[in-house]
Image (cartoon, rainbow, N blue to C red):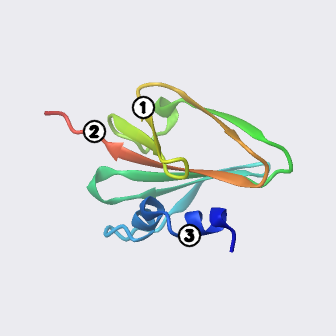
């Protein structure tokens, strides 16, 4: 097994999404010409979002979080594979997804004090 595959299979944040105690199944949110977006409701009002690119070429995606009707309020966005915080859903985000690849995000609900 390559180090890259080992890193994917042992990624603690991805495992936590898989084992989330809410236990809800993910579902396909969008399907469009070799690209799919899957979402899963998580405990604590959080969400997992996985964007797949099945095409033979890279794919550029711009997300306006206001158009994602399942979200209610503000969320912190984290890229699970790169282990980076990307900001919040208050700003649009762009992703370049290589051919036959995916982006896995966790959206953590920001609570108002």
Observer-side mark, 2 or 1, equals 1
Badge 2 marks a residue whose secondary structure is: loop
Which residue is disc 3 drawn over? Answer: 9
What residue is at 31 percent from the left and 70 percent from the top?
A: 21
Is residue 9 placed above or below 41 in the rendered structure? below
Q: Position of residue 95 (x, y in %)?
A: 63, 36
Q: In the picture, which quadrant includes the N terminus? A: bottom right
Observer-side mark, 1 or 3, equals 3
Query: Between marks 1 and 3, how big is the CA–CA gap?
Result: 25 Å
Q: Which mark is residue 110?
A: 2
Residue that extends furthest to the bottom in the rendered view of this protein: 1
Badge 3 marks a residue whose secondary structure is: helix
Q: In the picture, which quadrant includes the C terminus? A: top left
In the foreground, 79 or 64? 79
What residue is at 43 percent from the left and 59 percent from the top?
A: 13
Which residue is disc 1 drawn over? Answer: 87
What residue is at 36 percent from the left and 59 percent from the top?
A: 42
What residue is at 37 percent from the left and 71 percent from the top?
A: 23
Q: Position of residue 63 (x, y in %)?
A: 57, 33
The residue carrying pointer 1 sits among few (fewer than 14), some (14 to 19) or many (20 or more) residues within 10 Å by Cα, namely: few
Query: Between marks 2 and 1, how big is the CA–CA gap?
Result: 11 Å
- The answer to whether residue 60 is left or right of residue 109 is right
Badge 1 marks a residue whose secondary structure is: strand
Whichever of callouts 1 and 3 sits on the residue coming sooner in the sequence is: 3
- Image quadrant assignment for residue 109: top left
Query: Between marks 3 and 2, how big is the CA–CA gap?
Result: 28 Å
The answer to whether marks 2 and 1 mark residues whose Cβ atoms lie closer than 8 Å is no
Whichever of callouts 3 and 2 sits on the residue coming sooner in the sequence is: 3
């Amino acid at each position: 097994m390559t180090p890259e595959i080992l890193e994917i299979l042992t990624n603690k944040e991805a495992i936590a999404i898989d084992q989330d105690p809410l236990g809800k199944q993910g579902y396909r949110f969008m399907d469009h010409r070799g690209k799919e977006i899957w979402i899963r409701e998580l405990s604590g009002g959080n969400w997992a979002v996985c964007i797949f690119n099945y095409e033979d070429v890279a794919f550029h995606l711009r997300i306006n979080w206001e158009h994602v009707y399942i979200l209610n309020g503000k969320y912190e966005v984290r890229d699970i594979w790169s282990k980076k915080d990307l900001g919040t859903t208050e700003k649009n985000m762009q992703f370049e997804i290589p051919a036959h690849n995916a982006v896995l995000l966790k959206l953590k609900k920001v609570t108002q004090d």
